[in-house]
Image (cartoon, rainbow, N blue to C red):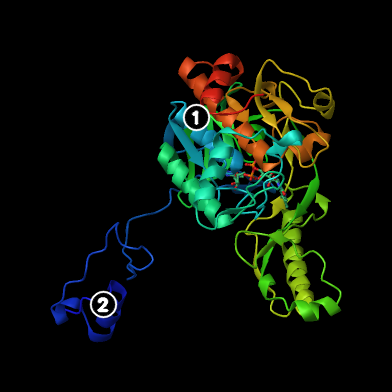
Amino acid sequence: MNHAMNRRDWLRKLTLSGTAASLGLTLPPTGAAQDPGASSGFQSSVLNPQEVQPGGASPSVEGGRVLQPARELPVLHSTDVLVVGGGSAGICAAIAARRAGADVTLVERYGHFGGLWSGGLVLIIIGHIVTGGRQVCQGIGEEMMRRLDKLDGAIINRRPGVPPTVDAEAVKYLMVEMVEEAGVKVFLHCWGVDAIVNGDQVRGAVFESKSGRQAILAKTVIDATGDGDLFAAAGAAYERRAHNVGLVSRIGNLDRVDRARAAAAQAPRNLGSETPVPGVNWVNMHGPEVDGLDVEVLTRLEMNHRKHIWNNTQKIRHTPGYEQVYLVETAPQLGVRITRVLRGLHTVTVDDIKSATQYPDVIGVGGASSGEHGPWQIPYGALVPEKIDNVLAAGRCISAEMRMADLVRLIPNCFVTGHAAGVAAAVAVQDGCTPRQVEVAKVQKILRDQEAYLG
Ligand SMILES: Cc1cc2nc3c(=O)[nH]c(=O)nc-3n(C[C@H](O)[C@H](O)[C@H](O)COP(=O)(O)OP(=O)(O)OC[C@H]3O[C@@H](n4cnc5c(N)ncnc54)[C@H](O)[C@@H]3O)c2cc1C
């Protein structure tokens, strides 16, 4: 046997020369230690030859209306804390709740974590350090940044006065590592489509996936979908807002621009800013102010933005000196900034910030994108719905007035509210109460123990 031959080569040889048996050969085994990319050899088998989808539960058209009959849903899982959405807020929430001792389940509609940060290619982290050089985002958010520091090519500009920029793949990798380390149960490729509600108490959520429509039961739910999908489905009050929807992209070979020839021409507009990958910039896009929950609007924008980005890259390539610049990728997900915003027990306002309001229920401190605001306290009440119970909001959809949108949605502020929601949910489970009833002093103590900054 030729020991230099790998499994892929063996399979190719088998395909060419007949079956293993006819050659009298034994294939090298596959195993966890093997590189999964290299352990090729496609196989398929019939899983359930008898499978027939149960009939009678499909919607029907009656009198021009489509009606969905009542049906029982299979329960996929039961958990203490269910976090819906694995973006910057959801990941911090899941890890924090787990570290605070709760059994945690995290559900994400895509195949990766990070939300807009990684999937939306929003690579720059603005607002964790505010006026006076004070770092307001600590705890799990800061831990992520420190761990990115240790990964090769994962983060740049980790120095005072400059916002750090990350590599999206490094973020996705790190989040898998941290979620696994914490022992969070994960379901990817699951889209949360409804809340399970008894009276005014959320008891879990319903998901659609390739496995069908299933339920997860939970003692407490955290809505970290960014769009408030779960608290809206549960019947919590919210405000629906329009904001700019763009599509971020990355362009490459900027280190191959012929500077001498480029100096003689007018430089192309919006070449973006640097990333940890040499010669590759990320290019932000504002886009029009629209309803980011309207599927027809999203469809049109996705198509228009793609055409615009391609054509714009062609323009760059036709500029003398820039011929080698190319489009590395457009973000796999559209840049939806703000949609639904919770109406919570407390709504954060710009006036609160200006008057540096101190809250007895402070659960974190927010930062700003420029020097216009100093640190601002975030009250627990901004995560708790006015009426519906057993659900908390985290991330860009917490309760804040319109003028606050561009502060609340900054990535470090999403880390902070996610972290706090996770701890509060775990305390609620441990004390057998609802998030509305938790002893905030207990939440604050655990947050400080987990190195969060509360001012
Ligand atoms: C174009 C653009 C530029 C920006 N620029 C900056 C910047 O320079 N600096 C900065 O700090 N911030 C910036 N932001 C803001 C920042 O990126 C986001 O506000 C932040 O990442 C939001 O985090 P989140 O966890 O609240 O939500 P998201 O990142 O949206 O995460 C939500 C997660 O939930 C999942 N999800 C959604 N619905 C469901 C569902 N029904 N079921 C299951 N899963 C679901 C999503 O797939 C996603 O993973 C920018 C945003 C955009 C769009």
Query: Residue 333 at what x, y percent from top left?
Result: 64, 56
Where on the picture, by quarter, is residue 380? top right
Residue at 76% x, 35% y: name it: 131
Residue at 60% x, 52% y: name it: 118
Of residues 359 and 153, the one nearer the viewer is: 153
On screen, residue 443 above or below 331: above
Of residues 270 and 222, the one nearer the viewer is: 270
Residue at 48% x, 15% y: name it: 431
Q: Of the two numbered discs 1 and 2 on the same chain, state the one appearing first in sequence.
A: 2
Q: Mark 1 points at which residue?
A: 97
Please say if the residues under marks 1 and 2 sit with CB atoms less than 8 Å apart. no
Can residue 84 be seen from the camera position used here?
Answer: no
Left or right: where 219 falls relative to 226: left
Left or right: where 279 falls relative to 144: right
Residue furthest out toward the bottom: 17
Q: Name the residue under label 2.
A: 5
